[in-house]
């Protein structure tokens, strides 16, 4: 019977054979498991149940960002109006120029680049070294050390800002780039993630290298690191995103424009352009802080999503 | 045959060597000891100085009556805690924290689940939609906050324009404390629901397909299958999300700071701690006390999670 029904999945066949194994279109009561692909019911259901919520959700997310981009090209006259103007008259970069001259935006951008590049590189290297040591090097208190790292993972950085401010300011790190970078360099997240990955590596690949006489340093960089590129990329990308977006710490430790990062600089811009006429300029600033990460995310989102939702699957 | 026999002994010998039969401080063990320190110590030292030490310092500072930048401080014991909990601000701050946490956690989880269900449908374009929905989660809170401040602008914002279209006046989001809080919560949910959606989607896709099919064959309709089958099976995911979103909501700072710089109606614990130390007052000791209160709350949630997850592991 089942060999026959796929040939003629018409309603007549189903009336004759109420197939219990969920044959195509087995009546209106049970859920339509695989109706004819282009039937009207299927089409309506696909659009209403599948596409409409999907498009709605996407639009709710995308439209504000599109609006930001469009507004960043608009003249004040196109923004200060009671009738909404959807598109700017011309792709006008005036707002970007104003943002750059009102506050040293180029400087903010450079500072953000330096803080992100240096901070993430050091963090990734420290994470690789620590994770390798925890997994492959014999040491008496490894489990206790790992627990301390796990606990550190759960300590929210927000509650440490005042003591860290006092510490770093006391060291002369106020309004310096190293003062922004240093307190965040220790990495519990990267160490944890890489340790979990290193533990899944087969011991045989290291034994071979050990027999070849390779020391820990060569084993790490010539065996372990090359086969762990996806995990390292995950750690690196998540670190880059959080360094770039970091706000509360740079906000506290800098109060001079020379060392501000982009998010802090935007706050400064908001103070000077915050009333009505400056929206175009502020949107230009928002574009400069949002779009770089958006591009990185678009290109490498697989790693970023995997890293940020870590723990959800392993529970 | 003979090859196998000759092959085996070295493997056994190697296994025996791996077990700690050898003297404790053989040359290799000592070398490993120092290799470990060389590799791990920089990171461990940084974590100790900038993660663990601040926790202790915070507790110490919380016992001081101390103006930030001042050279002298007086020890007041639990005075700062007493001041905070007996002040008129306390119910306000704790209430705002509770409202913000409950609404943003509930909002992003419920909407995240709905979006996950939409993403789980077998139509084209779900991959793009999934990325798009997740994107706000990785964007700068400062940038996002400014974009939404513009949308909420009572004069020239999109929302005001839409409201005018239906003959309504835009409310003054900034001046009204309740509306300020509502505005920040809406944006916070917008930014974070993609995270919940992607985690829920992973949960939905790992549901045992045979169980779901059996339910479908029993004649359960989509809604009933969802309520009676999917939702209970998703409970580990729901619990995981409840904890993680609660922890991050309690630490939410960026959006609150950029959208309501003066904390008008939006003073959660973390923001109050910031404003007290780095706002107009420079009350370092008082701020540290609020931070300790916040840390205690976060610690309780984390411990609850650990105890519960411990049990869940056996379950799955």
Image: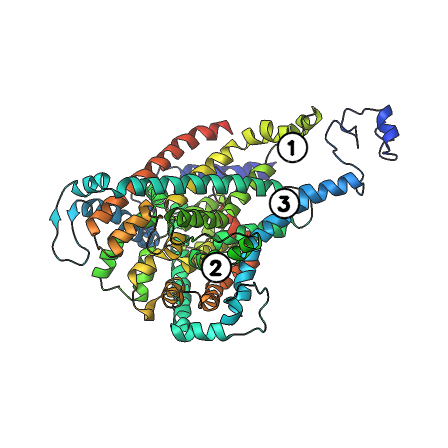
Residue A123 picture location, percent across and down: 39, 57
For label 2, the residue is B147
Helix, strand or loop at disc 3?
A: helix
Separation (CA) of disc 3 from disc 2: 24 Å
Q: Is residue A28 left or right of residue B68?
A: right
Q: Chain of mark 1?
A: B
On screen, A312 above or below B180?
above
For label 1, the residue is B209
Q: Is label 3 on the same chain as label 1?
A: no
Residue A185 picture location, percent across and down: 35, 56
Residue A67 picture location, percent across and down: 55, 61
Q: Residues within 10 Å of mark 1 (few under 14, many from 20)?
A: few
For label 3, the residue is A53
Helix, strand or loop at disc 1?
A: helix
Q: Is label 1 on the same chain as label 2?
A: yes
Separation (CA) of disc 3 from disc 1: 23 Å
On screen, A28 above or below A210?
above
Helix, strand or loop at disc 2?
A: helix
Name the residue at 66% across, 50% down. B125
- Whether residue B27 is visible, yes or no, is no
Tell which of A191 and B66 is nearer to you.
B66
Disc 3 vs disc 2: Cβ atoms closer than 8 Å? Answer: no
């Amino acid at each position: 019977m089942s060999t026959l029904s796929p040939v003629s999945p018409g309603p007549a066949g189903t009336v004759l054979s109420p197939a219990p194994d969920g044959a195509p279109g087995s009546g209106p009561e049970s859920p339509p498991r695989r109706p004819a692909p282009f039937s009207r019911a299927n089409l309506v259901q696909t659009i209403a149940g599948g596409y409409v919520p999907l498009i709605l959700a996407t639009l709710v997310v995308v439209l504000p960002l599109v609006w930001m981009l469009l507004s960043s090209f608009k003249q004040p006259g196109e923004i200060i109006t009671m009738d909404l103007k959807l598109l700017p008259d011309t792709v006008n970069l005036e707002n970007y120029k104003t943002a750059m001259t009102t506050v040293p935006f180029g400087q903010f951008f450079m500072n953000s680049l330096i803080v992100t590049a240096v901070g993430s590189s050091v963090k990734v290297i420290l994470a690789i070294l620590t994770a390798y040591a925890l997994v492959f090097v014999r040491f008496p208190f490894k489990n206790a050390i790992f627990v301390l790292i796990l606990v550190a993972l759960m300590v929210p950085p927000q509650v440490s800002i005042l003591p860290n401010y006092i510490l770093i300011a006391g060291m002369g790190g106020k309004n310096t780039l190293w003062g922004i970078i240093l307190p965040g360099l220790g990495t519990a997240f990267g160490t944890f993630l890489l340790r979990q990955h290193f533990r899944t590596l087969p011991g045989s690949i290291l034994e071979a290298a050990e027999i070849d006489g390779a020391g820990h340093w060569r084993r790490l960089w010539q065996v372990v690191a090359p086969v762990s590129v996806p995990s390292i990329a995950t750690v690196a990308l998540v670190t880059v995103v959080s360094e770039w977006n970091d706000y509360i710490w740079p906000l506290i430790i800098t109060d001079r424009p020379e060392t501000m990062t982009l998010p802090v600089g935007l706050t400064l811009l908001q103070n000077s352009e915050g009333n009505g006429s400056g929206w175009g300029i502020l949107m230009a600033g928002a574009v400069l802080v949002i779009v770089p990460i958006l591009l990185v995310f678009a290109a490498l989102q697989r790693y970023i999503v995997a890293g940020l939702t870590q723990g959800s699957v392993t529970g | 045959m003979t090859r196998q026999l000759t092959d085996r002994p070295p493997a056994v010998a190697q296994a025996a060597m791996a077990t700690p039969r050898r003297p404790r401080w053989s040359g290799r063990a000592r070398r490993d000891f120092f290799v470990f320190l060389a590799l791990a110590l920089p990171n461990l030292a940084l974590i100790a100085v900038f993660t663990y030490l601040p926790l202790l310092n915070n507790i110490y500072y919380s016992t001081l009556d101390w103006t930030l930048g001042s050279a002298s401080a007086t020890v007041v014991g639990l005075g700062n805690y007493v001041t905070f909990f007996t002040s008129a601000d306390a119910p306000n701050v704790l209430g705002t924290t509770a409202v913000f946490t409950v609404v943003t956690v509930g909002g992003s989880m419920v909407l995240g689940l709905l979006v996950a269900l939409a993403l789980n449908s077998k139509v084209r374009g779900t991959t793009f939609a999934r990325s798009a929905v997740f994107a706000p989660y990785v964007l700068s809170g400062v940038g996002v906050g400014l974009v939404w401040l513009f949308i909420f602008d009572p004069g020239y914002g999109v929302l005001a324009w839409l409201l005018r279209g239906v003959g309504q006046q835009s409310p003054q989001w900034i001046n009204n404390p309740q509306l300020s809080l509502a505005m920040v919560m809406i944006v916070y949910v917008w930014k974070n629901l993609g995270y919940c959606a992607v985690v829920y989607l992973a949960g939905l896709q790992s549901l045992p397909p045979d169980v779901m099919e059996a339910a479908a064959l029993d004649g359960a309709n989509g809604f009933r299958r969802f309520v009676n089958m999917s939702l209970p099976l998703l409970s580990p995911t729901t619990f995981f999300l409840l904890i993680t979103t609660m922890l991050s909501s309690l630490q939410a700072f960026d959006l609150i700071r950029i959208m309501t710089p003066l904390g008008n109606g939006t003073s959660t614990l973390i923001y109050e701690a910031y404003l007290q130390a780095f706002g107009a007052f420079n009350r370092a000791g008082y701020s540290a006390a609020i931070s300790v209160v916040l840390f205690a709350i976060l610690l309780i949630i984390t411990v609850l999670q650990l105890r519960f997850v411990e049990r869940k592991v056996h379950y799955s």
